Image (cartoon, grey):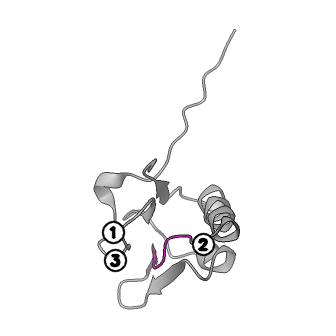
Amino acid sequence: MIVEVEESMADIDAKLDDNVDGKYYVDDTCIDCDACRATAPDNFLRNDDEGYSYVSKQPENEEEEQLCVDAMEGCPVESIGDDGS
């Protein structure tokens, strides 16, 4: 028997307006856990008024790219997305 596992990810239609344009984004399911900001602090910031994280800067090198992937994979509620670009 083969079991398929559905991979879920953030919903691009629920992308937060604070995100800068580009490949990575955070959607409105963010619970403000700080995981992404701890993992990739140069790329994620917190909206203090609303209590969520967002992509403040798209990765500019391989190290930042890997940290963004790590943040996406480590997000406990899968709020970080990659639009495939």
Instruction: Give the percent coordinates (x, y) of residue 30.
Output: 46, 67
Q: Secondary structure at mark 2?
A: helix
Q: Secondary structure at mark 1?
A: loop
Residue 34 vs 1, above or below: the answer is below
Residue shown at the point (64%, 19%) measured from the top left: 3
Mark 1 Cα within 10 Å, few/some/many (few <14, many 20+)? some
Which mark, residue 61? none
Distance from Cα at disc 2 to Cα at disc 3: 15 Å
Mark 3 Cα within 10 Å, few/some/many (few <14, many 20+)? some
Identify the amino acid type marked 3: Asp
Taking 79 as reference, is 71 left or right?
right
Identify the amino acid type marked 1: Leu
Q: Quadrant of residue 64?
A: bottom right
Residue shown at the point (36%, 84%) measured from the top left: 50
Instruction: Read off the magenta span.
Output: 55-59
Residue that label 2 marks: 36
Residue 49 vs 29, above or below: the answer is below
Identify the amino acid type marked 2: Cys
Residue that label 3 marks: 18
Pointers 1 and 2 in contact (CB under 8 A)? no
Instruction: Give the percent coordinates (x, y) of residue 59.
Output: 56, 70
Q: Quadrant of residue 17?
A: bottom left
Residue 54 included in the magenta stretch of the image: no
Q: Quadrant of the N terminus?
A: top right
Mark 2 Cα within 10 Å, few/some/many (few <14, many 20+)? many
Residue that label 1 marks: 16
Task: Compare marks 2 and 3 and give the one earlier in the sequence.
Answer: 3
Taking 26 as reference, is 70 left or right?
right
Instruction: Give the percent coordinates (x, y) of residue 24.
Output: 47, 62
Magenta span main SS: loop
Pointers 2 and 3 in contact (CB under 8 A)? no
Distance from Cα at disc 1 to Cα at disc 2: 15 Å
